[in-house]
Amino acid sequence: MSSVKDLLAWGVAQLAGYRDSSSEAGILLAHALGRDRSWLFAWPEAQVGQSQEDQYRELIARRAQGEPIAYLTGRREFWSLSLGVDRHTLIPRPETEDLVEFVLARLPDARGIDAIDLGTGSGAIALALASERPHWRITATDRSITALQQARQNAQKHRLRVDFVQADWLHGIQGPFQLIVSNPPYVASDDEHLRRDGLDYEPRAALVSGEDGLRDIRRIVATARPRLAAEGWLVFEHGFEQGAVSRALLGKHGYHDIGTGRDLAGRERFSFARA
């Protein structure tokens, strides 16, 4: 048997090519042991059972091959919520929290709000909003039944009220809504990033949107306005080079109060408008 300290040192060495190798080795060992990371540092000389050591070594090997940490642990933190994720759901990104902050600031505590999250995946946006605005009536849609099952489990875990509906964007959805929000696929089919940063492990349908990455954004912009209440908001995430074309699309379809929000790195990350 090996000690916690020795296994951590081995894991860090195996992940030497990763910027956060020490943190990632600790996350994976804590996961294999069913402990939190603070326990590892409190008990560095503790001996690890063989089955747990084997599990840890397998996790490290998979991470070294590029598999994302979130899929290895089955968890991802988003808006202080621990969300279950798997290979059927996109891994929630910190940048999407900027979109959530924008929505909450624009609708500070309005009541009687009907909101819908399109392509919810793990439920990240819908559940973040539900955690802050429990009196809103929130619907979340996705084409994938498997993704919806994961999102429902996340809602149940956190005791958040969201209605989940299988739908292809807004097809079959009536409204009206005071808020339509989405983090749709927006990567071009030939984008070189699809072969890096573990993206090849994530569901392609949640990433890729046609040759230019805008197919789904075009569809959402075109179909959302008739389903928005007067002065209702449409807010959607996009790539950092897609702000100008997103604003142009919104203008073409008759929206007003059009703008684009930036992430913490100053990159254009989501666009918004009102009906």
Image: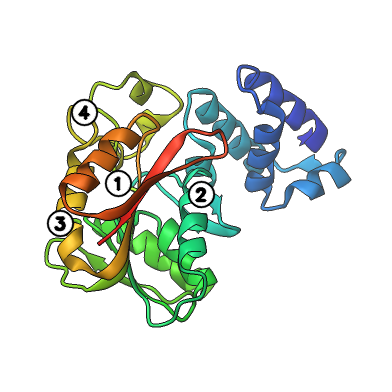
- SS class of the residue under badge 1? loop
Please name the amino acid that badge 2 sits on: Asp
Q: Within 10 angstroms of label 2, few (less than 14), some, or many (20 or more) residues?
A: some
Q: Residue tagged by mark 4?
A: 212
Give the residue at x 22% y 73%.
Answer: 176
Whether residue 90 is visible, yes or no, is: no
Q: How far apart are labels 2 and 3 at the CA level?
A: 24 Å
- SS class of the residue under badge 2? helix
Please name the amino acid that badge 3 sits on: Thr
In front here: 195 or 119? 119
Q: Are marks 1 and 3 in contact (CB under 8 Å)?
A: no
- SS class of the residue under badge 3? helix
Q: In terms of image quadrants, where is residue 14?
A: top right
Q: Residue tagged by mark 1?
A: 184
Please name the amino acid that badge 1 sits on: Pro
User: What numbered label is drawn on residue 223?
Assistant: 3
- SS class of the residue under badge 4? loop
Q: Quadrant of the C terminus?
A: bottom left
Q: Within 10 angstroms of label 1, few (less than 14), some, or many (20 or more) residues?
A: many
In front here: 178 or 50? 178
Front position among marks 1 and 2: 2
Q: How far from the left and from the top, in percent, is residue 63? A: 53, 29
Q: How far from the left and from the top, in percent, is residue 251? A: 22, 46
- Above-or-below relation of 113 to 247: below
Please name the amino acid that badge 4 sits on: Asp
Dot 1 or dot 3: first in sequence order is: 1
Q: Residue tagged by mark 2?
A: 98
